[in-house]
Image (spheres, grey):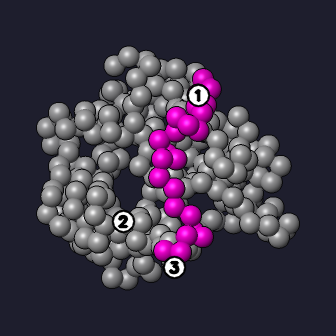
Amino acid sequence: MAKKDVYDLRKVLEELKQEPGQYHETNVEVDPDAELSGIYRYIGAGGTVQRPTQEGPAMMFNNVKGFPNTRVLMGLMASRKRVGKMFHHDYHTLGQFLNDAVEKPVNPVTVDEADAPTHEVVHKSTDADFDIRKLVAAPTNTPRDAGPYITVGVVYGSNPDKTMSDVTIHRMVLEDKDKLGIYIMPGGRHIGAFAEEYEKMNKPMPITINIGLDPQSPLVPPLSHRQHHWVTTNWVWLVRFVKNQFNWFKA
């Protein structure tokens, strides 16, 4: 793969389809209420479910009940071996590979909003028929869950004066048609400190929630808040950024 190629989720899935035992998909209708997780438990669920657990393929559900033209992917990052294949690297030494990436960073590329496919479809909470629960096929994993959850939401936030920013992963429950619940551990993450600053100012804290990302992005949160916006020269693509409507991130 050439350095200039974009290595996004679609490209990852194309490659995994060529790897035996790494990808599976179904066109059978599946209910997002407990069925999605219930099926994957027997395919490749890890240590968060009742034993016995097993390592299995990533799985794409192409027919999600109540969400036409929407697919749900599960288990992409659930196998170290699969992560190694996605990074074209020996999975035994992934830790050193990521360390080398941090030591040899380059700036991301900023693209014009007109060229940003992330802004091709826009839904606003002020729309008369807006209901995030009908737009996002978030699964309810167990009958005891508070509701549907976004389980790998990569959250990007900044402090009020925009001199620092942070990327973290959170589970987020869809509580109402225009409300998400997110737990930010007090003092445990930089984004928590940012939230406290906004709280003292009695102002809402703007964030972005990013899903369906390339394989690199979910590995960024453990890095320092000063390192998350960098990408490696050892890898095969540059992360492309676009300013959102709030224009509150510094390049």
Q: Residues within 10 Å of mark 3 (few under 14, many from 20)?
A: few
Q: Which residue is mark 3?
A: 176
In the image, residue 108 lies in the stretch drawn in magenta: yes
Quarter of the image with the N terminus in it: top left
Tell me: residue 126, above or below residue 165: below
Q: Which residue is mark 1?
A: 109
Q: Which residue is mark 2?
A: 137
Residue displayed at 51% across by 27% down: 238
Left or right: residue 248 compared with residue 148 = right
Q: Mark 1 or mark 3, which has the lower sequence index?
A: 1
Q: Secondary structure at mark 2?
A: loop
Q: Nearer the viewer, residue 33 or 141?
A: 33
In the image, residue 127 lies in the stretch drawn in magenta: yes
**Residue 85 x %, y %:** 29, 32
Q: Residues within 10 Å of mark 1 (few under 14, many from 20)?
A: few
Which amino acid does the dot numbered 3 rest on? Answer: Asp
Q: Residue 243's image quarter?
A: top right
Mark yes or no: residue 37 visible.
no
Q: Mark 2 or mark 1, which has the lower sequence index?
A: 1
Q: Residue 241's image quarter?
A: top right
Q: Nearer the viewer, residue 202 or 42?
A: 202
